Image (cartoon, helix red, strand yellow):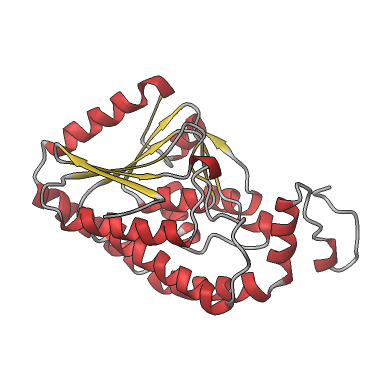
């Protein structure tokens, strides 16, 4: 496979898929998502692969979500991206191979949605986790709102989604968002350890366990489908995402006062 945004390596029963955009904190653009689809589909069909390691290049971030530097898209272009997101989620959830996320630095927004779509997460102590949706006039409707309550419980999920706080790796471990935390310098060794244990297990047994455990949350797909359509319309035509993204790009707090009655003081100022 000829890819620019994603690195793909296979050896000793393990496939490593790396978002290779360290200069953008591994934020994904349309091309990135297309290449991730190709990579996960290839790993799913490769009988030599027993476990998939998913990570980001560099030491500053696993992934910070969508690249807001991309030009504004039409609703049709936005839907195309969301069809790719749908394809990627299917490639990750239905391939029958355990997917282990290796995290250093930021795992935010769509990056954290990728995290919750995976099976296991090993983080270095530098890991920072959270969602950004309401901060930029949107919501994490690509499996974030749907899966976070299943992972961390409904009350904690509402806190993560409403307040858009960032959490340390240790805090993420305490809430069940990651499986293990080690010093950054020990991260690769810990990932190797988990991969070695997985590769000692029955491939068919792992496949059956993964598909069976996904059965209940598969029922959430209709919510994802509806949510992505709403995001496609809102991001292109909605004034709140336009204000939120403008504030982010201009490095200023978004002004939400004009979207509420009363025009009172802006609590985010």
Give whichever of 141, 107 is nearer the camera: 107
Give whichever of 20, 167 is nearer the camera: 20
Q: Specify the quadrant of the image occupied by residue 192.
A: top left
Number of marks in the rendered image = 0
In percent of width and height, residue 154 lies at 50, 53
- Relative to 132, is 260 on the left or the right? right
Q: Residue at x 47, y 68 (%)?
A: 81
Q: Is residue 220 visible?
A: no
Q: Residue at x 60, y 49 (%)?
A: 159
In percent of width and height, residue 73 lies at 59, 71
In percent of width and height, residue 77 lies at 52, 74
- Relative to 98, is 28 on the left or the right? right
Q: Residue at x 28, y 55 (%)?
A: 40
217 relative to 113, above or below? below
Quarter of the image for the N terminus: give it.
Answer: bottom left
In percent of width and height, residue 45 lies at 16, 58
Q: Specify the quadrant of the image occupied by residue 121.
A: top left
């Amino acid at each position: 496979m000829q890819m620019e945004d994603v690195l793909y390596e296979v050896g000793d029963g393990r496939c490593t898929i790396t978002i290779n955009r360290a200069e953008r904190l591994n934020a994904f653009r349309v091309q990135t998502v297309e290449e991730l689809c190709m990579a996960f589909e290839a790993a799913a069909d490769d009988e030599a692969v027993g476990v998939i390691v998913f990570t980001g290049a560099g030491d500053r971030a696993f992934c910070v979500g969508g690249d807001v530097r991309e030009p504004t898209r039409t609703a049709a272009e936005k839907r195309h991206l969301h069809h790719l997101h749908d394809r990627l989620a299917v490639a990750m959830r239905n391939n029958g191979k355990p997917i282990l996320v290796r995290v250093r630095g930021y795992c935010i927004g769509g990056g954290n949605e990728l995290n919750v779509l995976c099976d296991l997460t090993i983080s270095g102590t530098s890991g920072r986790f959270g969602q950004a949706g309401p901060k930029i006039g949107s919501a994490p409707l690509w499996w974030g709102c749907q899966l976070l309550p299943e992972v961390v419980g409904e009350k904690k999920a509402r806190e993560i989604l409403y307040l858009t706080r960032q959490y340390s790796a240790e805090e993420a471990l305490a809430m069940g968002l990651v499986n293990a935390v080690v010093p950054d310098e020990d991260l690769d060794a810990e990932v190797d350890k988990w991969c070695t244990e997985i590769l000692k297990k029955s491939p068919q047994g792992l496949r059956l366990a993964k598909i069976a455990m996904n059965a209940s949350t598969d029922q959430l797909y209709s919510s994802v489908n509806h949510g992505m359509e709403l995001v496609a319309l809102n991001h292109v035509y909605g004034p709140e995402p336009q204000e939120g993204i403008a504030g982010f790009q201009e490095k200023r707090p978004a002004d939400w006062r004009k979207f509420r009655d009363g025009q009172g003081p802006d609590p985010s100022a």
